[in-house]
């Protein structure tokens, strides 16, 4: 036994001398957690377990944060807004390519702010959201948020997108856990007010709750038409668990039911052979109008990894899902080559260009590489180490074809870094 151990040490030293990566030797067998953070209170730093120093990890997180939130060509902007004769500090996270501000990006910005302990940033984004996007007037949409505005605050749509409200509530509840109150905001009271608005809609004026109350599942949009289907990336059972634990609004049993239903729904929405999910689906999980794995879908593996690491209530299925998903994509196309859109059977997807023409997947996207890497948290596999190291080595910059998405790529890549470093938390 001692002889084999000596050989392994010599081989590792040889690899280091000639500059070969960890692929030269047996991959590190980092096992998935056996309990969730809700039980242990301990957050796993997977990156550190792979050998990265804390300084390397912190510097990487700061680099991506700066790219998205502090660079001149980044997504975030501070603005001074005059309200009732006073200057109010606000901020917005823009989808730069589309020159708009979305509840998706605003609520993501707030999530990053609470995870990185930046209450001033959190409040500036929340003020902008409430001032420009919230339906403050009385009427069927009262309390909901217009999903898209121009950067000057002019609404481009009065309709809402259910995922924005889902994130707003959760970020406010996490802020109540971390800070309690800060500046003018009592975060628990803010979340309770929003929850009351979200669960007060009955279809009047075409406006519904963000939850389809027949299926007890989140809908695509809270209106009488879009209430009839959903988006797999909107299903975050871990968030409903936070609602049940923290909101203190008498709906605890409902929130736990929503969490359980979301887990069951994901079983149906993810292909049983590949784990790949459509962008949109019916509530039974079948693709909506031929939907395949495109941009929204990137978030699903990370959402499932979050539920695995936080609550661990569906761990057996989630581990098998991660193995299938990795094999179908990384195993088939390679760690450094896999594209970003697929048919549900794992074939490279064809996307419509218009005029009857089609094009294949576009690129090896940093955002999807990030969310793919979080699957390493759920399983032990031959792909994990190389996948996470490849993800960590990537730079957020324009691709070879000149395309650059500082907003979506940047935000979900930053989320992935936080998950893999133990910095995406439910408590502090």
Image (spheres, rainbow, N blue to C red):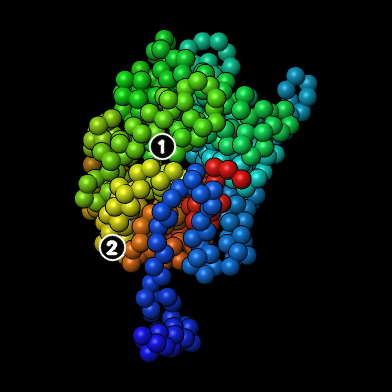
Q: Earlier in the sequence, mark 2 or mark 1?
A: 1
Residue 369 in sight here:
no
Q: Position of residue 362 (x, y in %)?
A: 35, 53
- Residue at image location 45% in from the left, 33% down from the top: 240
Relative to 82, say whether 7 is above or below: below
As helix, strand or loop, the secondary structure at mark 2 comes to helix
- Residue at image location 39% in from the left, 68% down from the top: 29
Give the residue pinned by disc 2: 331
Give the residue pinned by disc 1: 237
Q: Position of residue 180 (x, y in %)?
A: 67, 33
Q: Is residue 64 left or right of residue 120?
A: left
Q: Position of residue 18 (x, y in %)?
A: 46, 87
As helix, strand or loop, the secondary structure at mark 1 comes to helix
- Residue at image location 49% in from the left, 39% down from the top: 98
Total marks placed: 2
Q: Nearer the viewer, residue 398 or 89?
A: 89
**Residue 256 image label:** none
- Residue at image location 41% in from the left, 37% down from the top: 237
């Amino acid at each position: 036994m001692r002889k084999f151990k000596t050989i392994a040490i010599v081989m590792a030293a040889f690899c280091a001398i000639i500059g070969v990566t960890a692929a030269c030797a047996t991959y590190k067998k980092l096992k998935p957690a056996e309990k969730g953070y809700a039980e242990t209170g301990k957050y796993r730093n997977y990156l550190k377990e792979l050998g990265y120093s804390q300084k390397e990890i912190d510097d990487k997180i700061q680099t991506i944060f700066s790219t998205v939130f502090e660079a001149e060509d980044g997504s975030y902007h501070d603005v001074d807004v005059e309200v009732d004769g006073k200057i109010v500090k606000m901020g917005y996270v823009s989808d730069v390519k589309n020159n708009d501000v979305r509840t998706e990006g605003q609520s993501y910005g707030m999530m990053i702010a609470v995870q990185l302990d930046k209450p001033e940033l959190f409040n500036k984004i929340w003020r902008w959201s409430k001032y420009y996007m919230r339906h403050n007037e009385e009427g069927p949409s009262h309390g909901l948020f217009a999903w898209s505005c121009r950067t000057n605050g002019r609404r481009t749509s009065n309709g809402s997108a259910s995922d924005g409200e889902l994130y707003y509530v959760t970020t406010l509840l996490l802020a109540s856990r971390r800070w309690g109150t800060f500046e003018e905001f009592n975060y628990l009271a803010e979340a309770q007010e929003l929850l009351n608005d979200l669960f007060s809609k009955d279809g009047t004026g075409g406006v519904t709750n963000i939850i389809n109350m027949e299926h007890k599942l989140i809908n695509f949009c809270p209106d009488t038409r879009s209430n009839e289907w959903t988006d797999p990336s909107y299903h975050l059972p871990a968030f409903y668990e936070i609602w049940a634990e923290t909101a203190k609004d008498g709906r605890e049993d409902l929130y736990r039911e929503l969490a359980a239903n979301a887990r069951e729904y994901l079983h149906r929405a993810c292909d049983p052979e590949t784990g790949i999910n459509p962008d949109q689906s019916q509530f039974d999980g079948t693709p909506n109008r031929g939907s395949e794995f495109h941009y929204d879908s990137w978030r699903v593996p990370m959402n499932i990894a979050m539920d695995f690491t936080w609550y661990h209530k569906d761990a057996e299925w989630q581990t098998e899902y991660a193995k299938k998903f990795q094999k179908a994509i990384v195993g088939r196309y390679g760690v450094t080559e896999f594209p970003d859109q697929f048919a549900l059977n794992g074939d490279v997807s064809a996307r419509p260009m218009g005029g009857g023409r089609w094009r294949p997947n576009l690129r090896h996207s940093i955002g999807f590489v990030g969310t793919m890497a979080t699957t390493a948290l759920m399983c032990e596999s031959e792909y994990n180490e190389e996948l996470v190291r490849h993800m960590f080595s990537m730079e957020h910059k324009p691709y070879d074809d000149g395309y650059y998405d500082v907003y979506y790529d940047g935000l979900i890549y930053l989320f992935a870094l936080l998950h893999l470093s133990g910095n995406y938390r439910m408590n502090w």
